[in-house]
Image: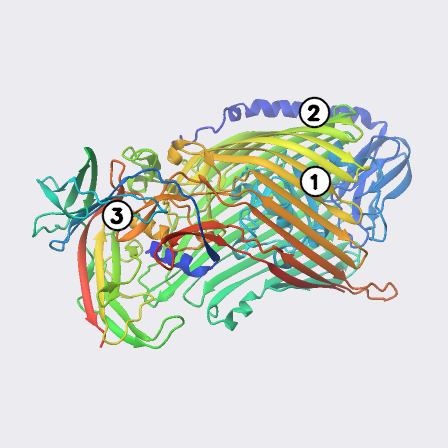
Amino acid sequence: MKKIIYALALVITFSACEEKIDLDLSFEGQKPVIEGRVTTETDSSYVQLSYTAPYNSNEKPQAITTAVVEMTKDNGAAVIFNHIANGMYKPAAGYVGAKNSTYHLKVVINGKEYTSTSKLEPMFTVDDSLIHEFKPKEGFLDEGYSVTFWGTYDQAPVKNYWFKYGKNDTLEEGDVLFDNADIELNKRSAFELPFFRPQKGDSVMLYFRSIDVYAYNYLYALSMLNSGAPGPFQAPPANPPTNIKGGALGFFYAADVVRRWKIMN
Amino acid sequence: MLTQPNEPILSFAAHSNKTMKKLLLLFLLFCTAAALNAQSRFTISGTIKDAANGEELIGATVLADGTTNGAASNEYGFYSLSLVKGKYKLIFSYTGYTTKTIDIDLDANKTINIELAENTVEVEEVVVTGEKADKNISENKMSAVTLDVKTAKKVPLLLGETDIIKVAQLLPGIQAAGDGSTLTIVRGGNIDHNLVQLDEAVVYNPSHVVGFFSVFNGDAIKDFEIYKGGTPAQFGGRLASVMDVRMKEGNSKAYSVYGGIGVLSSRLTVEGPIKKDQHSFIVSARRSYFDLFFPLSEQTKNVKAYFGDLNAKVNFTLSKKDRLFLSFYTGKDVLGLGSLFGFGWGNSTGTVRWNRIINSKMFMNTSFIASRYNYNLQFNISPNLNLERNNYINDLGLKSDFTYYITPKSTMRFGLFNVFHEFRPGETEPITSTSIISAAALPRKRAFEQAYYISHKTDVTTRLNVEYGGRLSVFSNVGAGREFTYSNGTPTYVDPANPGVRISSMLLINDTTNYATGDFYNTYAGFEPRVNAAYRLNAVSSVKLSYNRMFQYLHLVQNTTASTGQEFWVPSNPYIKPQRADQVAVGYFRNFMNNKLEASAEVYYKDMRNTVEVIDNADLDFTEAIESQLVQGRGRSYGLELLVRKQQGRLNGWVSYTLSRSQRKAEGINNGEWYAFRFDRRHYATAVATYDFNDRVSVGANFVFASGEAATVPVGYYVVNGQEVELYSKRNSFRLAPYHRLDLSLTLNRKKNPDKKYKNESSWVFSIYNVYNRKNWFSLAFKDDDNGQRSVYRTYLFGIIPSVTYNFKF
């Protein structure tokens, strides 16, 4: 839980003056970027391949379309992910991830091999129904509905979760990352969505994913890199700690996915 | 960070007993020589004080006219001068004070307590007579500067706050860590390489308001001395500098109340005698009130931000030979946003100091010292998600220091300093019972730090004087506590699949060793040689040389640029080795215009080992295995420092220039290659001037120029998780734009009426910070502009800032 709290604190605390400037930033050549996932939702697994691009240019990152992509579950047979379009690789229809399995990704780009591994951890139990309650304007929060979910943290610590929420099919910006290190095992707890006030008639969506610690660390570093923390609170910038071996950027994760919806009435 | 628990940190340590024996032998030799001389010599000793308020004067001199024999008062105002029987004219002097001359017939040991009166500005030029007016060339002390608060008060500063640390940052080799910051970089060292102490107690976080103000209230401070090299043996524990701040003792002559009302803060001080000329007290308080303005704006109405501090001190003259001082400081910072979240920090220190004149040649100071630093964080997003976290460092120490004035040309100093540290690195509590956060605490850590030192200052010839000595420092981790074992044997490692990237081994902890209460389970020891020498070339110039080795056993772990109050100190442990620095400096010192103008040129080279760096993407918050987020490496810094300073007359100030370089190197950062330290600045130039037109009007100006700091910038971008992400290359490979600014001040003093019984004084101080509104880069931000284009933004903190302060005294 600590990471989300700390990140939010930095953003809100302090404002400094900013001014846009022109800066000559040199580009050091293309590097491959791999983003891969296996989830428990059918046909949602994919691998996206692209190259890095110069920071100052308007050009989009170039897609990698000729790679060989394989996914292996535990010690099973490799499943080929085929190129669909724009660097997106997908397995044959009907592919679904299995809880407590370990997935091995292998990508070969121009003869060079990149690999990664991720364990698909189960999600904690989330109640089917969401609680919502109308609240007046509070501080900088407009009036609207507060939304609360109940969950039972029934996984032995430390497990990591990646949580997003939104309304009307649009997810809020930013990722909520938390672990269960500070949460009592098997405790059934309520959690009110922070800084969120949907209005009457809005359809609210919650999107939970269990992820392993490597993906968690990658996403946390990514959120800090893009936290918008002003000058004095910036951490030394660094590339997020990828779990892909071989020199590529990006990350690979396996996730158990749970979704919940509710219309505010 | 490969290390061997209990491994001696330097080979010298193994031979330290032998070295100590040699030093003891030297000591006995000098004592014997002194005893042989004793029959024909007598000693004059006493204290030198300010006639106006009874405050001891540090560094005041006494000289036997017509001889080369003299002495200077120590940091407690005590002096001792041994002379052959005879008649003498003694000249007591102190810069800015009227010289006093006394004729004596020395036929026995004598106690002479002297009070010197401050010169007023009407005296056109204060001419300090006597040889010691040129002590900057005659003494072997180098790389050190003493500042008095009176000088600091005339220098224009941010928001008109008198801040002695910011004045020090205008000296060569001493730089601010960012615009307006009191956090200080000394000769390329880290922020935590500075030992900041107030009346001998360590102040772990010397800043208020994320670093923009120091904790030192100018009204409560008497004296400030900074050593950036050539550090005397009585100081240790940090690599780069010692900032020795001393509080006023309190006016022992008369009661006075004074203070100031500024734009954002005010202060009030009361001092006076408890018993005239014997016991006195001082209480000084300060509080900011910018939080009062926040409710005026819709945007800031929920913001909380204030600081306050309190200094108090009493001193008692117990007998002709004994004095007791009790000093206390506490300060607090609070920042936050309504009840949503907040954070804060505070320092508290207490010192009980006992001065004893054992005899006319031997002075002792023993201090019991306590220091506490705490910082906290509260978060209250909702009834289900809230917490409060507190962290503490508690120190309890004993320091005993002896000065033996063997002859006028030979002084021995020795003593010890033992301190017990307790670290409480994180204690979390839910704010409400409905919070899903459960109470948790990281285990406390304890350590015992000891130091034993001896030094000898002697005039080898009429031209050469030398101070040499050493310090044996010992640091032990003490139970109850626990340490982790990593299955790969190291808390961090370079990823073989991604060379050049250092990875935490936190996931590889496979065992824990618990230690019982009182167990000394890991010990480091090191000997720190110290040498200062001055060779006088002629009446107006000298060359000086210094060498010092310093060990640092406590390390600040910080992942942001400013002081957020959330950075924390960690002790050395079986994995985190002590940091070590060896510094050598050579200087040429020359005075002009009958010592009114002092000039110096110093070059230095500092080699640092086991410097502590945070690994990329470190997870520092509430992490017990903190060694798994750090890497230790090397550092080096070198440079040239030029200074011309004038401290007398109506026009005071200095001009300085520093040419320097500071680098770091650590496996897993920048592929193990040397890279620029974050605050490496090639050029740093300052000019400070104050001019007193008369006793009512004075002006001040300062100008600073600094080369741009090092920064890390992206070399490309890519898309992942649906967002554009910067691709970073080498750490600190880019340079920010140069920094410069001009500040001005005008001080208007109320006309004095000498006929009035109550001589009320008041003044208005008008100042402008950053007169020409330079938007100095603080850092860079990389994000989309309003059109969704990837862009670069510079962050700047302060534009032009005018301020006014009203000071009063009655």
In the figure, B83 relative to A150: above or below?
Answer: above
Residue B422 position within the rendered picture, expressed as x and y whole percent measured from the top left: 48, 47
Q: Disc 3, disc 1: CB below 8 Å?
A: no
Chain identity of mark 1 = B
Visible in this render: residue B253? yes
Q: Hey, what amino acid is under mark 1? A: Met
Q: Quadrant of residue B770?
A: bottom right
Chain identity of mark 3 = A
The disc label shown at residue A215, or none: 3
Mark 1 closeness class: few <14, some 14–19, many ≥20 residues within 10 Å:
many
Q: Are marks 3 and 1 on the same chain?
A: no
| Mark positioned earlier in the residue sequence (2 or 1) | 2
Q: Is residue B272 left or right of A250 when viewed as pictured?
A: right
Q: Is residue B665 left or right of B35 when viewed as pictured?
A: left
Q: Who is closer to the viewer here, B448 or A176?
A: A176
Q: Which SS class for mark 3?
A: helix
Q: Who is closer to the viewer here, A9 or B30?
A: A9
Foreground: disc 3 or disc 2: 3
Measure how far apart labels 3 and 1 are at the Cα level: 61 Å
The disc label shown at residue B364, or none: 1
Residue B66 position within the rendered picture, expressed as x and y whole percent measured from the top left: 89, 32
